[in-house]
Every structure is written in C-alpha cells, then in structure tokens.
Image (cartoon, grey):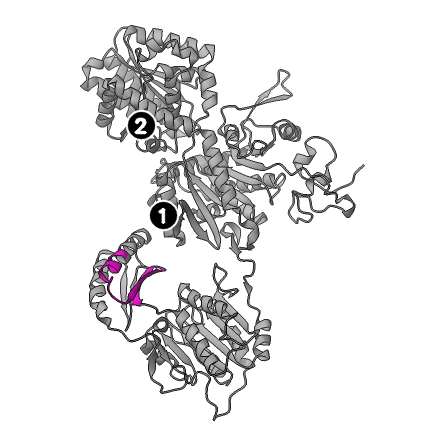
C-alpha cells in the first residue's frame, strides 16, 4: 500500500491511489498550508507523463448548483444538478473546451452531521462539488442576519434609520459573517492548486473571502463578481465595517460589476475612504493597490439562450400558451406581465398603483388590459416581507373591486413560483412586460421576455394569434434603477416612483404601432442573443487570466493584520536596503555622492514642525565633514525656507524648488540656477486662473514660490478635486501655450514651473560636475519618497553605466516604503532613513580644517 501524506480531496474522489507523477507538475513539493500536499518523497518524482494539467476554475458562491432530496426510505439522499443555476450555466463561457469547474458552496437543505461526510464524498465524486456545511444557528446569523438584514438593504440604498428599516448594525452578526467566510476559505484550501487554478467568487455573501485566500496564497488568481448593486459613497460610508469590506475586495485581482454606475460608486468609495485613485489604460480600468493592479470589469450578465429556446420548444409550453391565448386573447384582452420576487425592492406596489392610474385615466382599457403579476417567494424573511405581501394583496383586491366586472379582473396575482415552462408561456403570450423595481442588481426578466417573444418552431405556428400576423414584436417598460436598463435602449425607461409617468408609459407601450414594436424587439433580440451568459463568463475569465498573467514576475509580501491584510507586489529586484551592506560600501569607497530629499524622507510628512532636529543637523554635518563626500539636500520648498533650516551646516549643498536654485557647500555662498533665469511674467496669467479654481473648489489652496505656482486640492472632495484638476491643467496649458513653462499634475496638486526643471536635473548636474573635476563618485546614494524623486532615481540608474561615475561604482537608489518605484531599494519610514544616515556618519572621517569640500565649485 502506498503511504503518502496528502489531503487534496479531488485526488481521493475516485477512491484510487493518487497518481503522484500526474500531480507533480501542478502541485508544489513543499507547502506549509493545510489542505495541500505538504511533501512528496524523492522516489516518486516521476515527471514522465507528458499530459499537461487541465485548466481548472473554482466557482465559489453561497449556494451550490445542486438540488438535494431525501429518498423514499427517508434515509438516503438523491442529488441532481440545478440547470437553472447561473453557476452551472457559466460553463458555456469556458475559454477552453476541457476546462474543469469545481464548485464550493452550501446546500439549500440541512444535512445532519452524521451524514455530512458521505454526502460530501458523493457530491465530490459525481458533481465536482465541495459542500460547506454550516451549523443552523451560524447560518441563520450569517445569511438571514448580516446578509439579508444589513448588507442587502444597504446595497439597495436603504439606510437603517430605525430598527424596522434594515436593522441596525449588529457586531455579533458581523462576526458570524466573517466566520462563515473563513469556513469557505478552508473548504477552498482542500481543493485548490494555487499556482494554476482560477478562483471566481460570487456576490455579497462572500465579500471578505478574498482576504482569507490572499493570506494563504499571495499569488492566488482571484476574481470576484458582485451581482447586487453597489451603493453610492454617501450610503456605503454609513457601514461601520466599510474599510474592511473595501480592503478585502481589493485583495481580488478582478472585480466585476453589472453596470458602470455600480463600478463608479465602488471606485468613489475607494477614493474617498482609502485615498486610492484609478486610471484607464487601453480600455481597462485599474486600481494600483500596494503594487498590485486590481482590474475593474463592467459587463452585465446574460441569459442561457439554449436553455430558454429548449423550454420554448417543449410541448407543455405550447399547450400553456394556447390556454393563455384562449383565456385572454380570444376574449379581446391584452395581457401585461410582471414577474418579481416578493420583496420591498421590486416595486410591485408601485406597479399596481400605475395599473390603477392607467385604468382611471384611460377608460378605454377597462375590460381589456389585464396585469398578471407573478410573485415569486421572497428570498429573505422578516416583517418587511410580510408587509409587502399584505400590501400587495390589499391593493389587488382594491383595484379589482374598483375596475373589475363579471368575467374580468384587471389584476391577477399568482402568489408562488411557477414552473419554468409556465413562466416562459406567460412571457410568450404577454403584449407588454413591466419591470418597476426601485433598485435591482441586474434583473433578467426583460431578457427572458425578449427571447420568449422571439418564439420557437412550435410557437411560430401560433404567430397569427401571437403577433397579429406581422413580425416578432415586444414592448418593455423598464425601471431606470435596474442593471439591465442601460442595455435595453429600445425599452421605455421610467422612474418607478412617478406613478403617473409609469401609467402613461404603459399606455404608450399598448398603443405603440406594430412596426415600431417590431424594430424595438429586433434591436433587443440582437443584443440579448449575442450577450448571453456564456459571453459574460468567457469575457470575465479571459480578463482574469490577463490580469493574473504577471503574477510570477513579482515579489510579494503580506502585511497587515486581520481584515486589514494586503499583499505588496513589487519587482523581484526590489529589496530592503541593508545597513550592513550600505556601511560596507561606504567604507570601501573614497569619493561619494549623497542626494537626500527632505520632506517625507528625513522628515515625516505628517510632522507639523518641518524644521530639522538637532540630531539630523548633526548627522548631515558629520557627512559633510568627510572630504570624500558631496552631500546635497534636494527640496521642493523655497530657498528662503531651506536656507533658514540648514544655514548652520557647513559644506552642505542645497537645491530648492525642485532644482531651480542651487547653493554650493559652505556658508555665505550665493544661490545659482540650474536653468537660465527667465521672465516670471507668466505668473500674472496663471495665478488668476488658479484663484478662480480655488474659489470654486472648497478645500483647495495656492502656494506661490519664486519660480513656480502650486494648486493643491488635498483637503477638497477627491472626486470634485480630481475633476477640477483636469480642467485646470487644460486651462493652464491653453493660456500658457507660448510660455517656457510646463504644467504637471501631481498627487493632489497641479504645478506650473519653468520648463526643464526637475530633481533629475539636479542629480545629473552633480554627477557631471564631480566627473569634470576628476572626482567621479565610486558610490552614489539617492534617497527620496515621492513622484518628483523618481526623476533622480532614473538619472542615477542610467548613470551607473555612463561616464560620470567611476568604473564598478556602487549605486543605491532608495525610496521610502514598499511601493512601485524606479528605486531598487527601500526603507520603511523616515526614522529608518535617519538611522541609515547616522550609521554612515559614524564611520565618516573628518576632513582637515584646510580641506576644500567636494561640492564647492558646483556652478
């Protein structure tokens, strides 16, 4: 018997011994995470099997696409795949024909603990499903508690203003939600091959799952699709755990939304609450999150076209359509249809009020128009569901009493879920479909209606009765607050809260000319038939693969605790600057160039007092005292401030306003310029423009320097500030087109400065000057923290192979914090920068009194 340590359930599902040779290309030999093969003995290293591993996607959702029923004996279980499940239908969009899908989720039915192991084995072997069994009390607090009472209402724009409206935030329900997400993560670990598998998580039930997976596997290929709306920042920011959910979603590689509105709200929340900005490159929207690019996907889900067409072709569908035509069409009635879940967001009561208004304002439709409202059972439970049910029944009775007559009921309420073929029959027989939801993630009812009205070979025989002998026709009245609305440009879009407008829209749909109905139907059918569920899944999986293609080329670190965990992904050559290595290089060399930014580098950005401490001055003084050093502090501040701070540091070179001005080492020297002194008359043009934007952008300020102007919007509304900054850049570039200045957008700022000025020019001039004096540096150290310092890093990296440094010179470009940078080294914060400089100062050799500083003749 083979004795191995393994726990990959998919290998055990067949009951055979594991084929280690086949697994070895897919699973790493050493893993420290439970649920993956931890080791394989050397004598089983057989890589001779040339068969490449099948691509796999792990689909994770609250519910498995499986139906379970007790057997007749009451002891055994029987299972079948749920063909109506979106999770099962998305297999049609697999990028490759042999892609394997594994499903992780809960069963609708409660399985006794004693039977769970057997059920799990059966589902794994026969259906490739991994069930997540939750204790009933935990499931209730997770699903009916946090998901349905708190997340669901909030994501549909309902604020918990009172205990009856959505329910106040309950910390214990949140803890249950996190616990269940952790259980889901543990189940995924039992089957995942993190190096190759794709993981696709679905919907708001599992918002914190990405964090648990990213903690275990830094490079997991992880996608998330939200099937519900995402609320605006004003709504979302009321959630006490708002940051935790946002950061967890950002641990995914690709986040999908049905519409641009939902994606825009999510991006706005990331901007306002986390300070993140996004950009669009070649059609793809991306967020930079600690060196990882999180892509945003906007694509509405579609219907399963083949399934709908097959249902339309069933004999029972045809017979049901005939019965409906006999009941309504043959009696001169026009059938209007609504299909909705019985919950507070579907707008059933507003639809009934519109029907009542239609009959009151348009008497010609009394006795003819019939609204059939199919009310599917609510997915949640609580007082709000009971109130909706009671209100709906009361309104139906009132309308039927007011406008009904013998043999005519203007509203027919079908309270309960119909068989799929029955629903499709109602679609096929209806002249108009009404969707008046006040907020809905997608709502595929209009799509199903369009396909049903297109008909089938069987139903085409009824075309004369169905469509009046013309082409295929349909009429749609759709709320503008549902996800499918932007895709159905031929529908009559309505504000469901405006009951009178909805009633008039229904009247317009009923009275619309047949030719126009046909044109609208054809337009809808082209879109719905080409953007089906397979198209949606294929597009998402392809984008997920594209987003994750560069995972293996980057180094990753996990930082943070709990739900604040995130992964920093950086270039493989990017590493922390070792004190020992830097001091060793310093001792080995004789001539050195040291360039240091000040704000954010030697001094933390958050400090209110920006003047250097006595410790910092002592360190700089010791470094300048070594005759082999050229030390330069490069700052964006004006020269008066810089000179005032460092006046007592003999031999220190200074560069102010990002290099517009120089002052050589040694006291009393005059300032010089790196670029020719120009006329600053352009400020008289630029400043009034900036003042205009300052007056109209609350929280923005202007900083005026000798040679530059800076408009800052750090304290303004981030969305409005960003919009205003773009406008300001365009405005300034237009009015300053003939001036020798450049307009640049920075981090929460717009700066106008003389053309050609940059910190890179400072670094370039220093190296050139030293080389011209025959003192080409053997060591170059450049330290900075922000975007303007990247120009210095670029120059010294390029200079490493150029004529301005000594052969085999050691070059160190160091940034503050682990982040994307042209620097190859980093230190964590300003305190570490100061410690590094102090270490170098401690091994410096003081110069003789008569010696001349290296920096003396810089210009």
The one nearer the camera, 10 or 178, is: 10
Does 742 sit left or right of 779 as displayed? left
Residue 2 image position (x, y, % from top left)? 79, 38
Mark 2 Cα-neighbour bin, 10 Å: few <14, some 14–19, many ≥20: many
Residue at image mark 2: 478
Mark 1 Cα-neighbour bin, 10 Å: few <14, some 14–19, many ≥20: many
Magenta residues span 730-754
Residue at image mark 1: 268
Quadrant where the image shows the C terminus = bottom left
Q: Is residue 580 visible?
A: yes
Q: Indicate which disc residue 281 carries.
A: none
Residue 241 image position (x, y, % from top left)? 44, 47
Quadrant where the image shows the N terminus = top right
Does 286 sit left or right of 709 as displayed? right
Residue 585 image position (x, y, % from top left)? 58, 75
* Residue that lies at the very extreme toward the bottom in this rendered image: 850
The one nearer the camera, 412 or 288, is: 288
In the displayed structure, 166 sits above or below 85; it is below
Residue 571 image position (x, y, % from top left)? 53, 58
In the displayed structure, 363 sits above or below 487; it is above
Does 227 sit left or right of 479 as displayed? right
Dot 2: element: strand
Does 730 sit left or right of 223 as displayed? left
* Residue that lies at the very extreme toward the right in this rendered image: 1
Q: For residue 375: magenta?
A: no
Identify the residue at image location x=50%, y=85%: 627
Q: CA distance from mark 1 to mark 2?
A: 27 Å
The quadrant in which residue 3 appears is top right
The one nearer the camera, 38 or 119, is: 38
């Amino acid at each position: 018997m083979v004795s191995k340590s393994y726990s990959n359930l998919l290998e055990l599902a067949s009951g055979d011994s594991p084929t280690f040779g086949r697994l070895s290309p897919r699973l790493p030999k050493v893993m420290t995470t439970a649920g993956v093969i931890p080791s394989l003995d050397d004598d089983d290293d057989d890589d001779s099997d040339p068969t490449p591993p099948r691509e796999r996607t792990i689909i994770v959702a609250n519910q498995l696409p499986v139906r379970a029923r007790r057997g007749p004996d009451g002891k055994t279980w029987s299972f079948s795949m749920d063909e109506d499940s979106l999770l099962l239908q998305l297999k049609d969009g697999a990028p490759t024909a042999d892609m394997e899908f594994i499903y992780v989720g809960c069963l609708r039915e409660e399985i006794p603990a004693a039977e769970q192991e057997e059920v799990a084995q059966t589902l794994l072997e026969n259906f490739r499903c991994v069930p997540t069994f939750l204790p009933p009390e935990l499931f209730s607090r997770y699903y009916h508690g946090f998901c349905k009472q708190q997340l669901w209402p909030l994501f549909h724009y309902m604020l918990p203003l009172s205990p009856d409206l959505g329910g106040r935030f309950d910390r214990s329900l949140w803890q249950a939600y996190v616990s269940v997400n952790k259980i889901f993560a543990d189940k995924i670990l039992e089957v995942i091959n993190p190096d190759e598998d794709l993981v696709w998580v679905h919907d708001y039930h599992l918002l914190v799952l990405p964090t648990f997976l990213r903690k275990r596997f830094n490079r997991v290929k992880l996608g998330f699709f939200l099937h519900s709306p995402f609320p605006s920042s004003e709504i979302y920011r009321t959630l006490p755990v708002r940051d935790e959910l946002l950061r967890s979603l950002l641990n995914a590689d690709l986040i999908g939304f049905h519409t641009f509105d939902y994606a825009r709200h999510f991006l706005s929340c990331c901007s306002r609450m986390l300070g993140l900005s996004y950009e669009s490159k070649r059609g793809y929207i991306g967020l930079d999150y600690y060196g990882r690019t999180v892509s945003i996907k906007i694509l509405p889900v579609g219907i399963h076209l083949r399934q709908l067409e097959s249902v339309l072709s069933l004999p029972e569908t045809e017979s049901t359509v005939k019965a409906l035509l006999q009941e309504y069409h043959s009696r001169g009635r026009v059938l209007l249809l609504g299909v909705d879940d019985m919950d507070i967001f579907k707008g059933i009561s507003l639809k009934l009020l519109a029907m009542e208004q239609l009959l009151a304002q348009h008497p010609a439709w009394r006795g003819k128009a019939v609204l059939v409202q199919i009310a599917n059972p609510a997915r949640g439970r609580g007082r709000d569901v009971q109130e909706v049910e009671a209100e709906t029944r009361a309104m139906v009775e009132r309308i039927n009493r007011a406008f009904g007559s013998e043999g005519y009921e203007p509203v027919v309420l079908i309270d309960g879920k119909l068989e799929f073929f029955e629903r499709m029959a109602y679609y096929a027989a209806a002249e108009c479909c009404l969707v008046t939801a006040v907020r809905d993630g997608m709502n595929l009812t209009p799509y199903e209606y369009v396909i049903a009205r297109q008909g089938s070979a069987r139903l085409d025989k009824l075309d004369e009765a169905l469509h009046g002998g013309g082409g295929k026709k349909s009429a749609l009245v759709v709320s503008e607050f549902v996800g499918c609305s932007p895709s159905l440009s031929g529908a009559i879009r309505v504000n469901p809260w405006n009951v009178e407008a909805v009633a008039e829209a229904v009247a317009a749909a009923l009275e619309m000319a047949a030719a126009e109905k046909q044109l609208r139907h054809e337009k809808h059918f082209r879109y719905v038939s080409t953007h089906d569920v397979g198209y949606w899944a294929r597009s998402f999986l392809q984008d997920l693969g594209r987003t994750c293609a560069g995972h293996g080329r980057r180094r990753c670190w996990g930082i943070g605790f709990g739900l604040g965990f995130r992964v920093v992904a950086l270039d493989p050559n990017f590493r922390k600057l070792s004190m020992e290595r830097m001091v060793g290089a310093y001792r080995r060399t004789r001539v050195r160039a040291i360039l240091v930014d000040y704000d954010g580098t030697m001094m933390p950005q958050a400090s209110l007092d920006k003047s250097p401490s006595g410790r910092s001055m002592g360190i700089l003084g010791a470094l300048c005292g070594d005759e082999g050093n050229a030390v330069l502090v490069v700052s964006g501040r004006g020269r008066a401030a810089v000179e005032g701070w460092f006046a007592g540091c003999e031999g220190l070179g200074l560069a102010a306003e990002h290099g517009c001005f120089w002052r050589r080492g040694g006291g009393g020297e005059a300032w010089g310029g790196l670029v020719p002194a120009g006329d600053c008359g352009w400020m008289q043009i630029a400043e009034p423009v900036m003042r205009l934007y300052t007056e109209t952008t609350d929280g923005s300020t202007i900083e005026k320097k000798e040679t530059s102007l800076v408009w800052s919007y750090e304290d303004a509304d981030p969305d409005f500030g960003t919009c205003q900054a773009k406008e300001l850049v365009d405005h300034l570039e237009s009015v300053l087109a003939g001036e020798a200045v450049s307009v640049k957008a920075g981090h929460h700022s717009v700066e106008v400065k003389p053309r050609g000025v940059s910190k890179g020019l400072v670094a370039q001039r220093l190296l050139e000057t030293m080389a011209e004096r025959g003192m080409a540096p053997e060591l170059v150290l450049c330290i900075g923290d922000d975007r303007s310092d990247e120009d210095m890093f670029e120059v010294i990296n390029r200079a490493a192979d150029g004529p301005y440094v000594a052969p085999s010179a050691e070059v160190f470009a160091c940034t503050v914090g682990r982040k994307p940078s042209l620097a190859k080294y980093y230190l964590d914060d300003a305190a570490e920068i100061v410690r590094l400089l102090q270490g170098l100062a401690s091994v410096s050799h003081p110069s003789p009194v008569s010696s001349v500083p290296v920096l003396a003749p810089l210009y």
